[in-house]
Image: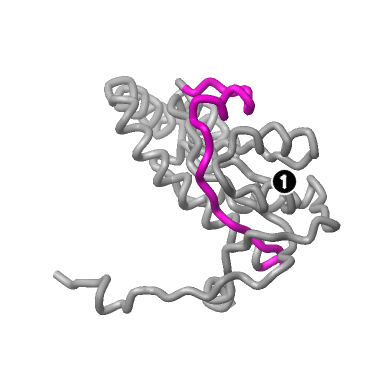
Amino acid sequence: MTSKIILNRRSIRNYDTSYKIPREELLNLINTAQRSPSAGNLQPWRFIIVDTPEGKESIRKVMIGNYSQVDTSSAIIFVLVDLEKHKLAKNIFETAVEKGLMPEDVKERQIANITSRYENTSKELIQIESMFDAGLVAQNIMLLAKEKGLDTGPMHGFDANKIYDVLKVDSNRYQIAVLIAIGKANEEGFPSVRLDVKDTVSFL
């Protein structure tokens, strides 16, 4: 089933404008997608969902291309990363203890190790690591959407000097990893080729 979803997924650029995904459905989809692995289980991903005409118009003004996706999709999901993700370690691991998933001594050790590590790591390295984690959750979103009969299209292309003001987030702390258009396709996605596995894999 999973392989069929992967093989049938296409990046869609034009959506059925009459179809609106309920917010509860979007929240449930993202909640499941958040089962993605992440470094230290710090879950650096943050999401901003743009699904109102006013919201779409505001981001449209700072997009560079991809206008059809913004105009026709049910929603645009911004996947961002929190460069201060380690500040949530205490909350994450205390919750794990409360749920009986982690002993108290392991919690204390994890918090100490993570705090020490990230307070002595450059923001650039934290961003690289967090973007990797964001890619995992973004792929989960797209595959789960396909499983539910929805379509998606990952995007970049925006004015980085203006987009964060529109989203009302601090660019010193949060960085955009990817935008995902989501809705019901109004056209077939373009077929595409992939490199042969013999050209991409080596063994050691």
Q: Is residue 9 left or right of residue 116?
A: right
Front residue of 51/90: it is 51
Q: Residue at image x 59%, y 22%?
A: 165
Q: Give the x, y percent position of residue 54.
A: 78, 33
Q: Quadrant of the N terminus?
A: bottom right
**For residue 159: magenta?**
yes
How packed is label 1: few (under 14 Cα within 10 Å), some, or many (20 or more)? few
Q: Is 141 situated above or below 81?
A: below
Query: In which quarter of the view is residue 121 placed?
Result: top left
| Residue 119 spot, x, y in % from top left | 33, 20
Farthest residue in the right direction? 18
Q: How is the image coloured?
A: one colour
* Residue 124 percent location from the top left of the image: 32, 30
Q: Is residue 106 magenta?
A: no
At 34% from the left and 38% from the top, the residue drawn is: 128
Seen in the image, is 123 located left or right of residue 45? left
**Which residue is most to the left?**
204
Residue at 72% x, 53% y is: 73
Q: Is residue 80 left or right of residue 133?
A: right
Whether residue 100 appears in this view of the structure is: no
In the displayed structure, 93 sits above or below 11; it is above
> 155 above or below 53?
below
Tag 1's secondary structure?
helix
Q: Examine the rendering and report whether any part of residue 19 can be seen.
A: yes
The residue that label 1 is drawn on is: 27
Q: Residue at x 67, y 63 (%)?
A: 151
Marker count (numbered): 1
Magenta range: 147-171
